[in-house]
Amino acid sequence: MKRISLLTVASGIIVLAACTAEKPVEKKSLLLQHEDEITELISQMTLEEKVNMLHGKNMFSSAGVERLGIADMQYADGPFGIREEMEPHSWNSLGLTTDSATFYPTGSALAATWSEDLAYRYGVGMAKEARLRGKDMILGPAINIQRLPTGGRTYEYLSEDPLLSAALSVKYTLGAQDNGAAVCLKHYALNNQEDARGSVNVKVSQRAMREIYLPPFEAAVKEGDAYGVMAAYNKVEGDWCSENDMLLNRILRDEWGFRGIVISDWGGVHSTVKALQNGLNVEMPGSRYFGQALLDSVKSGAVSDSIIDIRVREILRVRLTVKPVPEAEANQVMTSQPEQQQIAYDIAKRSIVLLKNENKLLPIQAEKVKSIAVIGDNAVRTQALGGVGAGVKALYEVTPLAGITKQFEGSGITIKWAQGYAEYSKRDRESRVSPYTNADPKLMDEAVSLAKESDLVIFVGGNNREVETEGRDRNAITLPMGQDELLKALSAVNPNIVTVIVSGAPVDLRVVQETSPAILMSWFNGSEGGTALADVLSGEISPSGKLPFTLPIRLEDSPAYSLNVYPQEMPQRQGDIFTNLVNRRNAAQLGGPDAEYAEDIFVGYRWFDTKEVPVLYPFGHGLSYSYFNYLNLEVDMDDDNLVAEVKLRNTGKYDGEEVVQLYVRRPDSKIERPLQELKGFQRIHLQAGETGSVKIQVPMKHLRHWDEAAWDWQLEPGTVEIIVGSSSKDGRIQMETEI
């Protein structure tokens, strides 16, 4: 390999070395280790037994074959904590005392850690709790790209960037499957909005699909050997995802080599013959299409015995790889265990993003602050449950107020709380009352009075799980329940405001920016979220999270809104497909709108950077209580990889962690490209005054683009600019290479 060393302002041109290197051997999927045994089992099964495996048995299980020793498949909902036990055929709790689980920080919080190690531990924790409950497959991770700032499930998904999402998806998958539980990647594919998700037809270029929306799924399948995939509700180019030959057969199985099972989202099947032939294994949770209708289709000759055997084989691969937990051993001890609670805390503390810290207002100094007003409903609101869809019956959840109170206990600081703004409740959501209201005068007056008599205000605002919910996108990113109005009133009587945003998605922070010298993003941050927040506020740990998405100045600046392709005009009100299913209404979806992905590959920061649209806070942004100097860059290259080694020094007074980000530009490209794209990242811990280095490996395949004419990946020769820094807008060191 050839090594090149560049100082911070290096501008030399380097030619990539054409060294030969041994190609890595692709790992054989663990799912292929039982093929002979599976062949024997299938030969002993009746048609009825085979078909019985292809649909739901209970709300969260599908059938095995008891006489042949094939256990049922048990599914665990959802991606950020193991859902409580449900009655077999309803959504009602079974009322157990051992099924309280750990609430892990949600997807955008995990992504804010920018840590593959923590993503792996996340998967480990989820798997261990799933196995205590007798579950075989986790319905997660949720890895769709955050296309819309208003997306109802943005909090559940990871990032606006495919490389960051892919890296974390792989490690979550490996962490879970190394510990005995299969994953079910969701929602495949292009499930990027909740409004009309059960009927919308996505129209997207092949290039955007391949470069932006599919990489997390591809990586988790090819590098993580994911055992399961969940088909999304929506259509892609006219075909439902649950019966989409291009997605399920040609790409997932034929190109990527997927050997596992595809299950439907709940109620997301629309046909029998087409769905089975085009790649679906299991209809969940019922048997409308894959029960008697499938038996009849086989008997009439519309479906061949061979395709039934293929789908059963794919199920048995997973069933024989994931060892069933005997029923007598499941649910015997409390689901949430200290080891998993520690994982939740470690993720939470590294996810918190310090957006702003004027006048070094943080960390809080006990010798200067004697009274703190904690203001905001979110200071006392738990976030494990709420809204539509998956939630966690958490064993406990430390709220921001509880964490702050405990942290400063005995310090001589007086802490008082005022609600400040009204809660947006389940009743409000179900009544479709808008969360974007004026402030409550009585609550505001109480908060202002408390702020006036306090040294410091900690305002805990943002959204809750009723504002951000599956099944419905927000129609604005404004802070709900009059929070902006309240903040203006608070700042008029006390300028020392630390605003903590509890949210899983972008919100409009223009008023927060004007009124608050210090701002933190604290997410829906799990069972230990309040503890982690208090540790950051106090300076016990230095914040090290980085934004996994862009915070725009205005919603209208974001690509889909700027191009007026979202929200779409709905043909008629149909209700949400999942909510219809839960409420036992007719879940059949009529014709839905087209979702035109007119921004193409220019999603998130790619749009803002390329179109030169100003943002409030850029992708990858996050401050520390310390300071990191980027000193120099060395690069090794061969045919397969570019390895950048970056040296940093912590020049501040606090120990801290930095996430080094590597972006690539192609200034003389002959094809349309974003201004820059993330191609690597690495987290590093440095003590105060310490110097260290990180290595970032960029596979050459990650520098390719999808050529629609060739229908393949291509590596364009030419100049490559490498920018290394602390965010997409904070490049510290750069160089050029030629390929």
Image (spheres, grey):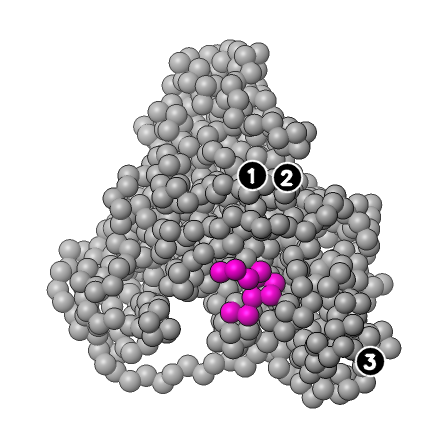
Dot 2 surroundings within 10 Å: few (below 14), some, or many (20 or more)? many
Describe residue 700's horizontal placement relative to residue 259 as left or right. Answer: left
Q: In this view, does 127 lie above or below 33?
A: above
Q: Nearer the viewer, residue 260 or 490?
A: 260
Say which quarter of the image contains residue 208: bottom left
Residue in the picture at 67% in, 70% down = 273
Which quadrant is the N terminus positioned in? bottom left
The spot of residue 558 in percent (x, y) is 37, 42
Q: What stretch is highlighted in magenta?
A: 237-246
Circle 1/circle 2 CB separation < 8 Å: yes
Which quadrant is the C terminus positioned in? bottom left
Label 2, on which residue? 387
The label shown at residue 445 is none
**Amino acid carrying mark 2 in the image:** Gly
**Amino acid carrying mark 3 in the image:** Thr
The spot of residue 279 in percent (x, y) is 61, 71
Label 3, on which residue? 46
Q: Is residue 232 above or below residue 279?
A: above
Dot 3 surroundings within 10 Å: few (below 14), some, or many (20 or more)? few
Q: Assess whether residue 340 is covered by the magenta stretch.
A: no
